[in-house]
Image: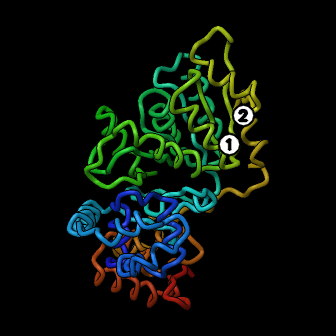
Amino acid sequence: MLQNELLYLIALSMVPNIGDVHTKTLLQHFPHAESIFKARKSALERIPGIGAVRASAIRNFRNFERAEKEIRFLEKYKINALTVRHDAYPKRLLNCYDAPPLLYFKGNGQLNESRMLSIVGTREPTDYGRDWLRKLITDLAPFEPTIVSGLAYGIDSLAHKQSIKSAIPTVGVLAHGLDRIYPAVNKSLAREMVELGGLLTDFMSGTQPDAQNFPSRNRIVAGISDAVIVVETGNKGGSMITADIANSYHKDVFALPGRVTDNKSEGCNKLIKENNAQLISGAEDIIAALNWDNIPLPPKKIQRMLFPEISLEERKILEIIAREESVFIDTIYQMSGLRSSDTASAILNLELLSLVRVLPGKRYQVI
């Protein structure tokens, strides 16, 4: 992605009263984010849902220095900025009407794997919930799913930890910027997740984990996967909100049943009773419902020692290109975290070694 375009996309996310839905509407009417800020107020007003107040907010915005600061932060910490036009943007989210137009991702995992599951639940699970979840992820591991959760206490953290133990990718969706980890006790866990999966948010650096941010986090958790699994929850709270959002996105929702006298099972039992979730007893229910038996396992990633004669930078770029059928040059720049000159030199050497080929539109493909 061109830095100039990213600058204006970040700026657009900072404009008062311009949320995700309005941003997507604006991007449908203008070829670039920059052109939104340069448009006449009258032209902005004519766009459905924008009106005079939002048009004025866009025209009066001046804090581009903050957007520039954010770009420097992304570059320093090798964080990828993903837009709806980006190859690595989670494709499942594109089917959600209120999907964030801009996401920030740090990690080595992929957000478009063939099998992705979101797991949510109480912050204070019982032994029943903990034991069941550990077995579920262990039994699903041969199918190599990516497990998504919210890096919170309880079920979220357990889902991430068991995924790492089972050597499958796991992604944490955050309700704050990537300059911090909340809760702080999960800092070491977050570092492990970055190696195999990653951390994802739609919030800029400096954003605190305030209560109003969690519904935004929940909608990403609900929309990014094939299904949502609820493991123990009360009658209210974030897990129930996530399940409700998933249903509105027409996602499969599964819930672990419990005794009617257990408070931690009250929400799950309610979801099942009201036909807002399918009862689940184990991994076999997920496998059957999502037809995983008939979906080929994802191809194994290129082993780092497969081409010992190439440099570490070249191996890194080769792995990026190998993850997709073809990858745009801008995506390679973003995901590699290397300087443009180093990236160009590495790609050229990979071409000379007949390891990659260039396609029309400056896309690259592994041979």
Q: Residue 300 placed where, x, y %?
A: 58, 61
State left or right for residue 210 relative to residue 322. left
Type of amino acid under label 2: Asn
- Residue designated by label 1: 247
Residue drawn where x is 49% and y is 63% of the image: 22
Crowding at mark 1 (Cα within 10 Å: few <14, some 14-19, many 20+): some
State left or right for residue 315 relative to residue 301. left
Between 102 and 324, the one nearer to me in the picture? 102
The quadrant in which the C terminus is found is: bottom right
In the image, residue 323 sits, relative to residue 270, either above or below, namely below
Type of amino acid under label 1: Asn
The quadrant in which the N terminus is found is: bottom left
Residue drawn where x is 32% and y is 77% of the image: 3
State left or right for residue 67 relative to residue 225. left
Crowding at mark 2 (Cα within 10 Å: few <14, some 14-19, many 20+): some
Residue drawn where x is 60% and y is 58% of the image: 97
Between 309 and 192, the one nearer to me in the picture? 192
Q: Residue 47 placed where, x, y %?
A: 52, 72
Q: Secondary structure at mark 1?
A: helix
- Residue designated by label 2: 276
